[in-house]
């Protein structure tokens, strides 16, 4: 017996060592699946298990909106979806056509111009959280937004998707959106990096701009998105910059984005933005999407293998003309994107098309609407005093969540202005279309079949009988309007709106003009219209937000995120020649350089129709003389401006205090003023609040393109405290030692 026992005891370790005897031994989990390990260990472990072909497969599309994971290792695919204003409906595998699902009708949030117009980073945070929850619920890895290209000309078809003309406002408003979006385990993809400031020839126009303008105007919002927002992906733009396509541009991607800004995420092309294998390999591109290559994508067989970063890339690796380290860097960035999103099992589950999201859409819309004019306090409209209200204009009923290009949305609901106004005023409302623009169509402008004279006559009849007219006009998401793929052809309102307005004003002077648009427009009738409201593409809750503001339920507090010039040629980009805008079809030179928007108007003493940062309220505010915490600052210090804001009116409201800086006797050209801080202050009727705005002295720097350094000259500076770029209440001189 003992011999047998001894034998078994002797044999046990052998069993154990050979793994035959699993004494409650856990199966060894590979490191890349072990969420207790640091993400970089997981990435390098996954990389070490992958073949070269599997790594290359991570770097290009497998379908219209997805790229491969590593099926063999259980690493999921990357699913991308537009757009900045809400989650686009599902698209078919290999075409731009909708999949016609019945479970993807989303919440349409306001366009980002509206978000910017709120001048309230808290709105950006709730927006990013809500749209992130919807993208998470729809199981998207990447949401293709937000866009922060600078508003350079009112003709750009996609201004409505961006955050205006000022790099500081765009920077402050883009960061919370990204931070809150990504807390849902969905990657933001800030776009379009960079210098995509028009739609004409967007696929190839070669932008020439100075280092100063690049650094001071066009890059700051992207830099903030990456270094503060920590965006996990970024989209290269279609155009070229200094002769290289931005989707594989060595200066923008390798030197600035990945070098200076230490971006560790994935660079994704705009759809069809890659044009060359060696550049795509060596100049910092990580995922190639939407390429036409040699037209193979018209067939569905192996088109994706013909992508520049597919078989051609594999060939270059095999030949050794591209080092393996380049492939490993790309694959690591894609893996990092995946581990931060779909392979983070702790990420929330999201939510979709909820009342809470509708409330966020409405709140952002209400805070973004801008009151531009309100003579004799025609607004807010008081139902008890009005017998009849004539609503005129196609935009009172036209759906605005559709059209516009890739930011197009299939929404579960969209409340039109007319619907909400009827809700408020019942049968006091009459409606006439007044003008017609034709059906919304991406890629072409379709004229309306309706007779303009008949429409106009009906509108005039209604206007004659009404106590007040609400004209709901503006632009729409048709091609050559606010729409991707083309720029506007005129600065004026289209479809005969100016003429119609003039006819209405002949029969009724109580006209409220409500503009629904994402761009500035000419207003030849501005002197004859007592009230003007700039509403944006406001999404699912558009009508409710508009009606709340027009009836005074909500006191408007929006401020313009871009200037409205009187005429197009007042605008810097449009005041030079064709080469300056839209370019000569090959090249474009940004001749206005750093003087974009109010930087142009204020430096050139051109009075805008409505200035940057302008917006009225139904109440009044008074600002006190500001105090700076010091008179003389060193370059490493922070300036703190303190002031008092008082609501001297009868209703609660919010004012946006803005601080601009001016360098006196600068050795280089500097704009008349530059925004360096703002604060939105909410006050009850009669309430007084002390507020302060701080900014770093180093943020007063200009970029010296001779030394490629940011410079803060010692000397005199002037701080301007105001409520628009033109409405400066106080100046405060400071010195930098
Ligand atoms: C479009 C747009 C880009 C969009 C992408 C996918 O061309 O430029 O903003 O995200 O392609 O639709």
Image (cartoon, rainbow, N blue to C red):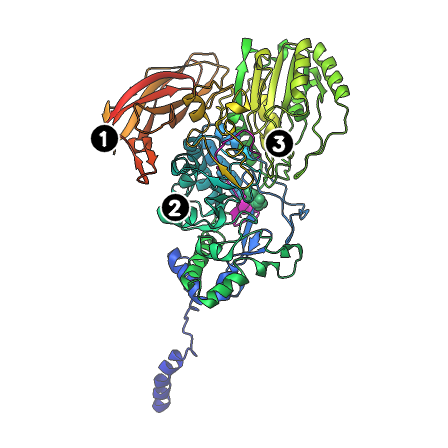
Q: Which residue is mark 2?
A: 256
| Camera-nearest residue between 698 and 480 | 480
Q: Earlier in the sequence, mark 2 or mark 3?
A: 2
Q: Residue at x 46, y 41 (%)?
A: 178
Describe the element under mark 3 as helix, strand or loop. Answer: loop
* Circles 3 and 1 in contact, beta carbons < 8 Å: no
Q: Which residue is mark 1?
A: 634
Secondary structure predominantly adopted by residues drawn in magenta: loop
Q: Is residue 630 above or below residue 57?
A: above
Tell whether position 141 is magenta.
yes
Of the two numbered discs 1 and 2 in the rendering, the one whose residue sits closer to the viewer: 2
Q: Which residues are magenta?
A: 134-157
Density class for disc 1 (Cα within 10 Å; few <14, some 14-19, many ≥20) is: some
Specify whether tag 3 is near ligand 1 (CB below 8 Å): no
Q: Which mark is residue 481?
A: 3
- Side of 308 relative to 225 (left or right): right
Q: Is residue 685 above or below residue 287?
A: above
Density class for disc 3 (Cα within 10 Å; few <14, some 14-19, many ≥20) is: many
Taking the image as four quarters, which one is ligand 1 found in?
top right
Which x, y percent locates residue 543?
62, 26
Label 1 – label 2 distance at C-alpha:
28 Å
| Camera-nearest residue between 11 and 720 | 720
- Side of 112 relative to 106 (left or right): left
Q: Is residue 332 visible?
A: yes
In the rendered image, the quadrant that contains the C terminus is top left
Describe the element under mark 1 as helix, strand or loop. Answer: loop
Q: Earlier in the sequence, mark 1 or mark 2?
A: 2
Question: Which of the 4 quarters of the picture holds residue 634?
Answer: top left
Q: Earlier in the sequence, mark 3 or mark 1?
A: 3
């Amino acid at each position: 017996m003992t011999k047998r026992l001894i034998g078994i005891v002797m044999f046990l370790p052998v069993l154990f060592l050979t793994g035959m005897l699993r004494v409650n031994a856990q199966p060894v989990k590979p490191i890349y699946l072990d969420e207790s390990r640091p993400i970089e260990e997981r990435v390098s472990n996954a990389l070490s298990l992958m073949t070269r072909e599997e790594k290359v497969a991570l770097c290009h599309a497998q379908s219209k909106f997805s790229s491969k994971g590593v099926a063999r290792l259980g690493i999921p695919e990357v699913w991308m979806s537009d757009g900045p204003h809400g989650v686009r409906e599902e698209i078919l595998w290999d075409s731009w056509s909708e999949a016609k699902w019945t479970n993807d009708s989303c919440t349409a949030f306001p366009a980002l111009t509206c978000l910017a117009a709120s001048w309230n980073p808290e709105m950006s945070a709730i927006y990013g959280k809500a749209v992130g929850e919807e993208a998470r619920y729809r199981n998207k890895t990447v949401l293709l937004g937000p866009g922060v290209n600078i508003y350079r000309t009112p003709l750009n078809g996609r201004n409505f998707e961006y955050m205006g003309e000022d790099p500081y406002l765009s920077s402050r408003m883009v960061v919370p959106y990204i931070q809150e979006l990504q807390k849902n385990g969905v990657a933001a993809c800030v776009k379009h990096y960079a210098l995509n400031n028009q739609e004409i020839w967007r696929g190839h126009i070669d932008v020439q701009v100075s280092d100063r303008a690049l650094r001071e105007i066009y890059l700051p919002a992207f830099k903030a998105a990456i270094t503060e927002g920590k965006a996990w992906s970024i989209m290269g733009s279609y155009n070229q910059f200094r002769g290289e396509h931005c989707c594989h541009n060595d200066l923008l991607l390798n030197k600035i984005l990945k070098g200076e800004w230490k971006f560790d995420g994935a660079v994704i092309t705009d759809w069809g933005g890659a044009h060359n294998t060696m550049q795509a390999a060596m100049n910092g591109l990580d995922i190639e999407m939407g390429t036409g290559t040699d037209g193979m994508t018209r067939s569905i067989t192996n088109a994706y293998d013909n992508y520049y970063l597919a078989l051609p890339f594999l060939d270059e690796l095999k030949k050794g003309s591209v080092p393996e380290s380049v492939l490993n860097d790309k694959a690591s960035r894609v893996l990092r994107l995946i581990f931060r999103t779909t392979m983070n099992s702790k990420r929330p589950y999201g939510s979709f098309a909820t009342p809470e999201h509708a409330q966020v859409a409405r709140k952002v819309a209400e805070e973004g609407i801008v009151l531009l004019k309100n003579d004799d306090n025609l607004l807010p409209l008081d139902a008890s005093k009005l017998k009849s209200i004539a609503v005129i204009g196609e935009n009172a009923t036209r759906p605005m969540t559709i059209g516009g290009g890739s930011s197009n949305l299939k929404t579960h609901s969209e409340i039109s202005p007319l619907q909400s106004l009827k809700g408020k005023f019942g049968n006091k409302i009459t409606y006439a279309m007044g003008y017609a623009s034709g059906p919304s169509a991406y890629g072409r402008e379709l004229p309306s079949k309706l007779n303009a004279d008949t429409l106009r006559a009906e509108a005039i009849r209604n206007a004659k009988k009404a106590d007040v007219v609400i004209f709901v006009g503006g632009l729409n998401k048709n091609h050559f309007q606010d729409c991707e793929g083309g720029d506007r052809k005129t600065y004026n309102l289209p479809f005969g709106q100016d003429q119609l307005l003039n006819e209405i004003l002949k029969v009724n002077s109580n006209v409220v003009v409500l503009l629904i648009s994402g761009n500035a427009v000419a207003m030849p009738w501005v002197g004859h219209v007592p009230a003007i409201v700039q509403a944006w593409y406001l999404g699912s809750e558009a009508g409710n937000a508009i009606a709340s503001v027009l009836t005074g339920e909500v006191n408007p507090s929006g401020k313009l995120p871009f200037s409205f010039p009187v005429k197009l040629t007042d605008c810097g980009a449009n005041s030079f020649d064709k080469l300056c805008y839209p370019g000569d079809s090959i090249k474009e030179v940004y001749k206005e350089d750093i003087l974009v928007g109010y930087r142009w108007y204020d430096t050139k003493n051109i009075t805008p129709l409505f200035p940057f940062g302008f917006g009225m309220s139904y109440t009044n505010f008074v600002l006190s003389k500001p105090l700076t915490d010091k008179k003389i600052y060193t370059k490493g210090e922070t300036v703190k401006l303190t002031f008092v804001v008082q609501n001297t009116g009868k209703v609660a409201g919010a004012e946006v205090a803005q601080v601009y800086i001016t360098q006196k006797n600068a050795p280089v050209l500097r704009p008349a003023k530059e925004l360096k801080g703002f604060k939105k202050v909410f006050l009850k009727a009669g309430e007084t609040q002390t507020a302060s705005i701080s900014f770093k002295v180093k943020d007063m720097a200009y970029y010296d393109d001779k030394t490629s350094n940011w410079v803060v000259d010692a000397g005199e500076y002037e701080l301007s405290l105001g409520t628009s770029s033109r409405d400066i209440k106080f100046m405060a001189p400071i010195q930098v030692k």
